[in-house]
Image (cartoon, coloured by chain):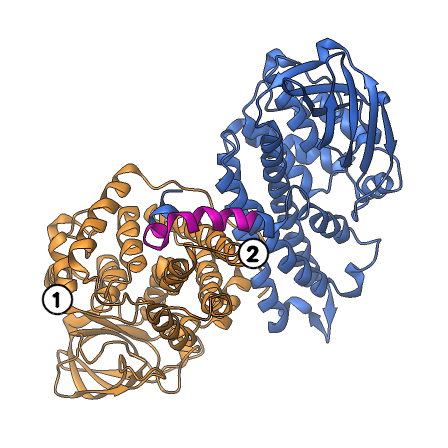
Chain colours: A orange, B blue
Amino acid sequence: MFQGLAFEPFDLPAEAELIREEVREFLARELDPGTLPNSDFNAGESAEFSRKLGAQGWIGMTWPKEYGGLGKSFLERYVVTEELLAAGAPVGCHWIADRQTGPLMLKFGTEEQKQRFLPKIISGDYFFSIGMSEPDSGSDLASIRTSATKTDGGWLLNGSKIWTSYAHTNHYMVTLVRTEPPSENRHAGMSQLVVDLSDKNVTVTGIRNLSGEEDFNQVFFDDVFIPDDMLVGTPGNGWEQVMSELGYERSGPERFLSAFRVIVEFTREIERSPSDEQLVLLGRLASHLITLRRMSISVAAMLGAGKLPLTEAALIKDLGNSYERMVPEIIRLAVPESCSQRFVDTLNECILHAPSFTLRGGTREVLKGVIARGLGLR
Amino acid sequence: MNEQQQLISETLRRLLTDLCTPDIVDKSESGIFAENLWRALTETGLTAAGLGLKVGGSGGDIEDSLLVIREAARFAAPVPLAEHFIAGLLLSEQGQSIGPGPVTIATGKFFISDDLSLSGTANNVAFARWSSEVVLVAQAADGLKLCRVPTSGFDIIQKNSMAGEPRDALNVNTKVVEESVFSVDPKTHERIKLMGAALRALMMSGALESVLEMTVKYSTERSQFGKPISKFQAIQQQMAILAGEVAASQMASHAVVDSFPNLSELDIAIGKARIGEAVSICTDIAHQVHGAMGYTLEHSLNHRTRRLWGWREEYGNEREWQEIVGRHFAAQGADKLWGAMTAL
């Protein structure tokens, strides 16, 4: 039975606002004003930038101090992430490790794994990819076939993952694999393995996206030996573990800020003498963005309180992605003919990346299915 | 929701379930005021929940009244709770009690002379024909005056909104008494507009929640091709969009509630614009899912959707408020845009 949606208003605490100022000062110092900010969080990477961010304590900042974290609140982390995204900072290297790998290990990992990986993630030395999709398994994740069979002291991994962002530059990939043959319960028998991407039996092949960039890959496993201590959590529990990551993966500001730089450059184009129509458009986009941000903060507060608001997270991603798709499409029709090259470059980059907004992290169709389930329709 | 609001919400839902049936809403549209409903709301203190005890209110917070207004909209309650509340707030600032009412508010062009002759006209006055008094702002030689005037002093031309809600035209040319005339702030017109927009935004978000609930329920009950239509992906995908818009409206309405005491223009503008936009999308989907059944006058979906179509136009539609929001952010400039958004 449908019980209604739970988006409670939430104000960011004062300490979160203090961090905001620190991040802004850091970004003003570190980002080269001469380069164009990324209009998509997944579009730029810089190991150097990530290490500097790590030195500030802003990777894994919510994690316990014993692993090198600052023990900050989830809402303070929220502020750091949204500031990075709004500035178009190159966050691609550490993003997944900070958002997903760390929380996964804290929840399911062994003490040894936490000690081994978390401090290095925090310092910006270890970058992680996510290995979920396969050539024949996209939205239907439970149909994956990449498998690991038990061998002495570990597992032998065979198969392939695809659309793996930054597998060519990252160090590790948390990989969802079958450790038991498929059974009636499609979600049973999966496990998560940490794969060392520099292993000689791992082959990473770049795939060009339609904008010509090579940031995602196909990754092949040919009898890759994975030691027992590189399995995260419990063998066979992979599906549940992956599902628990989705609240983090889907509700953050990267789900509605991808096109933000387009709005910034649009504002730059019109700020001196805006027409009424342009003001109406800017106001419309702003009222959507501000509302989405409030929803995202509300879910961040829920996650911080240990809840798992999966329907709400799916809802933010779906609503936010639709918004990100809409932004460049309506702005392109509202600018003066004589707009700057800076604006055109930002807009074009966004348009070329836009098809990925509603695919990555769950297609909009899958998300709507999740929401429909939350509504009690299926 | 605090304990007090929980109590208000439960009392109100019970009362509305009994006294705001679809039949009562229909009767109101055909010209019979929902008098029992109004009396019950007054007797339980709900029409003045957020007004102070000294001015005859129930002594609660402003939020309590906002809750009542929003919840009542879920039921399409055919009573002027919003107008009565605005009038009550304005009168309370003058130390005046509003009384059982209903009292409505007229926004139009009114003039008052030194000898207290009031003249002028207003359109779209909610429920004027069934109100005991009208509160209005008139221009005097020395500034603005808030006047409370018995409805009997007006010439009322009855008109209805597309939802069948009274939106009367008023003409007045009468003498008023000195005790009912108060000097007010030059910004009073703007304040009334902001209050009206905020309350319509809240009413829309309340009605939208009810539209979502009705549509979920209908889709699980209606069978075609041998199964409930909710089992079809085509329906599920539409319902997910509906839910997203309702959730966004809910979030925007929280911000409107928070900003009401200070009447922050930007927050109210964002709320009215965002929720108004949700109305177009949600009513489209809700009607599509309800099929021809929802297109009938008999089905109570239209009690909500017709009101939503009316309310999104009142006190400024999306375009008007979007422009205000846009002007605010354009004035900040590109490099301060993000800072201005996070400062909200």
Give the magenta range: B321-338
Q: Residues within 10 Å of mark 2 (few under 14, many from 20)?
A: many
Q: Is residue A246 visible?
A: no
Q: What residue type is labelled 2?
A: Glu
Mark 2 belongs to which subunit?
Answer: B
How far apart in space, not on screen, are marks 2 and 1 (Cα)? 41 Å
Between residues A233 and A45, which one lies in front from this camera angle?
A45
Residue that label 1 marks? A48
Asked if labels 1 and 2 touch by Cβ distance under 8 angstroms, the answer is no
Image quadrant assignment for residue A125: bottom left
Question: What's the residue at 59%, 52% (across, down)?
Answer: B319
Between residues A339 and B223, which one lies in front from this camera angle?
A339
Q: Is residue A169 visible?
A: yes
Q: Is residue A59 magenta?
A: no
Are the residues under badges 2 and 1 in a single subunit? no
Question: What's the residue at 19%, 60% (across, down)?
Answer: A31
Q: What residue type is labelled 1?
A: Glu
Q: Residues within 10 Å of mark 1 (few under 14, many from 20)?
A: few
Image quadrant assignment for residue B76: top right
| B41 over A176 or under it: above or below | above
Residue that label 2 marks? B245
Q: Give the main secondary structure, helix, strand or loop, of the magenta stretch.
A: helix
Asked which secondary structure carries label 1, the reply is helix
Mark 1 belongs to which subunit?
Answer: A
Between residues A9 and A272, which one lies in front from this camera angle?
A272
Does residue B303 appear left or right of residue B315 in this picture?
right
| A266 over B23 or under it: above or below | below
Across and down, in percent, residue A221 comes to: 22, 87
Across and down, in percent, residue A235 comes to: 27, 71
